[in-house]
Image (cartoon, rainbow, N blue to C red):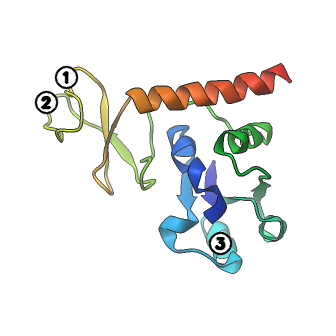
Amino acid sequence: MRLLLDLMCGGLRAYLRMCDHDTAYAGDRGLEADDDLIAVASDEDRTVVTRGVALAARADESILLESRDVEAQLAELDAAGVDLMLADEPAFCGRCNGPLESVDPSASTPEYAPDPTAVEIWVCRDCGQHFWRGSHWDRVAETLSGVRDADEAE
């Protein structure tokens, strides 16, 4: 999905990007006014994700969230039909939403990244951030699994 998160939903961006949703965030783009969000969503064919009733009503495509809690918001997105499975091959940077590409095992990586011969690593073509399936990935997987399990139990 191509999503645009308003300022009240920024905690969702990394989760959604890790699930391969092209997720723009209003805060990253300096978008504050509803009219600006609606224009960007329309121009870029994005679904607005918001807690604002008026904004949701005005947007061509929107998902209205009620909760302030990120896990509860994820559950609401799941109930709305948004796929919350982690990507096998992530495509979007969790930091900036830029495109990711695989790092060659022979390439040099920053000190914070693990050895690319031992772990698959991706780098963002826009901001240069490196990503791999580490403890953060595991925590996100656990959170998403809990959201899906709770939905299935209902």
Q: CA distance from mark 2 to mark 1?
A: 7 Å
Residue 121 on image: x %, y %: 30, 33
Relative height, residue 136 to residue 12 (above, below): above
Checking the image for residue 37, the label placed there is 3
Instruction: Determine contact: label 2, label 1, CB under 8 Å.
Output: yes
Relative height, residue 57 to residue 112 (above, below): below
**Left-right relation of 69 to 143:** right
Mark 2 falls on what kind of element?
A: loop
Mark 1 falls on what kind of element?
A: loop
Say which quadrant the C terminus sits in. Answer: top right
Report the residue marked by disc 2: 106
Residue 12 on image: x %, y %: 59, 48
Among the 4 quarters of the image, the one containing residue 19: top right
Report the residue marked by disc 1: 117
Among the 4 quarters of the image, the one containing residue 75: top right
Checking the image for residue 139, the label placed there is none
Mark 3 falls on what kind of element?
A: helix
Q: Amino acid at mark 1?
A: Thr
Q: CA distance from mark 2 to mark 3?
A: 42 Å
Mark 1: give few (<14), some (14-19) or many (20+) Cα within 10 Å. Answer: few
**Left-right relation of 45 to 27:** right
Task: Name the one closer to the observer, 49 or 147.
Answer: 147
Is there any visible trace of residue 6 in the rendered image? no
Among the 4 quarters of the image, the one containing residue 56: bottom right
Q: Earlier in the sequence, mark 2 or mark 1?
A: 2
Instruction: Determine contact: label 1, label 3, CB under 8 Å.
Output: no
**Left-right relation of 32 to 152:** left
Is there any visible trace of residue 108 in the rendered image? yes
Q: Residue at x 64, y 56 (%)?
A: 9
Q: Amino acid at mark 3?
A: Leu
